[in-house]
C-alpha cells in the first residue's frame, strides 16, 4: 500500500464537498503538473490511502483521509473546451492528463496544520514542508503517515 497527500483549496473542493458527493466518491481532476500526473498514472493503486489537505486558506493543513477507489484514467476535463481545466493539446486518443477516483474515509478530529507539521523533527523529509515544493500530490512514507496520525 502507498500513502499520499493531495491538496485542494477548500473554497474550490474541500473535505465536506467530498463527504457530500454520491457514495462519498469523486474523481480528482484538474491536475496539470507532469510529476503529479505521473504519480497518479504510475504509482497510485486501489486501496492507497490519502491525506486530504486544505491549501491556500487561512490555516492550511490535513483535514481528512481518502482512499483511491479507481486507478488512473484520462482526465476528461482536459477535453472539454468549456471546462476550466481544458487543454487543447490533450485529446482522448493521446491524453496528456490523468485522474483517479477517491472516496471519503473520515474527517480528522482536528486539522493538523502546516505550521504544526513543520515543527516535527520526524517529518523533516516530508516533501510538503520542503521549501519550494508546490506539488498538489505528495508521497508520504508509512512512518510519516503513522506519525502524522499520532498527532491527531
Image (spheres, rainbow, N blue to C red):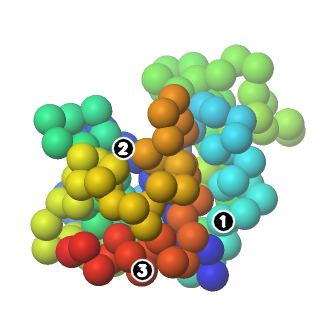
Front-most of residues 91 and 99: 99
The numbered mark, 3 or 2, whose residue comes first in the sequence reads 2
Q: Crowdedness of circle 2 by 10 Å Cα count: few (<14), some, many (20+)?
A: some
Closest to the camera, between mark 1 and mark 3, is 3
| Direction from residue 45 to residue 69 in the image, left or right | left
Dot 2 falls on a residue whose secondary structure is strand
Residue at image location 28% in from the left, 33% down from the top: 56
Indicate the quadrant where residue 129 lies: top left
Asked whether the beta carbons under mark 1 and mark 3 sit within 8 Å of each other, the answer is: no
Residue designated by label 3: 146
Residue 133 visible to the viewer: yes
Q: Is residue 20 above or below residue 33?
A: below
Front-most of residues 17 and 114: 114
The numbered mark, 1 or 3, whose residue comes first in the sequence reads 1
| Direction from residue 37 to residue 83 in the image, left or right | left
Task: Name the quadrant of the C terminus.
Answer: bottom left
Q: CA distance from mark 1 to mark 3?
A: 19 Å
Indicate the quadrant where residue 45 lies: bottom right
Indicate the quadrant where residue 48 lies: bottom right
Find residue 23 and report its horizontal and vertical position in percent.
Answer: 34, 73
| Direction from residue 30 to residue 90 in the image, left or right | right
Residue at image location 35% in from the left, 71% down from the top: 148
Q: CA distance from mark 3 to mark 2?
A: 22 Å
Q: Is residue 132 above or below residue 54?
A: above
Q: How many marks?
A: 3
Find residue 144 and report its horizontal and vertical position in percent.
Answer: 47, 71
Closest to the camera, between mark 3 and mark 2, is 3
Q: Is residue 109 above or below residue 28?
A: below
Residue designated by label 2: 8
Residue designated by label 1: 44
Find residue 119 and report its horizontal and vertical position in percent.
Answer: 29, 54
Amino acid at each position: 500500500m502507498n500513502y499520499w497527500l493531495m491538496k485542494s483549496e477548500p473554497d474550490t473542493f474541500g473535505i465536506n464537498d467530498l463527504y457530500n458527493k454520491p457514495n462519498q466518491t469523486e474523481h480528482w481532476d484538474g491536475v496539470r503538473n507532469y510529476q503529479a500526473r505521473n504519480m497518479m498514472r504510475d504509482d497510485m493503486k486501489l486501496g492507497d490511502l490519502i491525506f486530504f489537505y486544505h491549501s491556500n486558506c487561512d490555516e492550511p493543513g490535513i483535514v481528512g483521509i481518502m482512499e483511491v477507489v479507481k486507478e488512473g484514467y484520462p482526465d476528461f476535463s482536459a477535453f472539454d473546451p468549456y471546462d476550466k481545466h481544458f487543454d487543447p493539446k490533450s485529446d482522448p486518443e493521446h491524453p496528456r492528463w490523468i485522474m483517479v477516483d477517491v472516496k471519503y474515509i473520515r474527517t480528522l478530529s482536528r486539522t493538523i496544520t502546516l505550521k504544526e507539521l513543520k515543527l516535527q523533527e520526524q517529518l523533516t523529509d516530508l516533501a510538503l514542508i520542503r521549501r519550494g515544493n508546490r506539488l498538489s500530490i505528495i508521497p508520504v512514507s508509512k512512518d510519516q503517515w503513522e506519525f502524522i496520525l499520532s498527532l491527531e
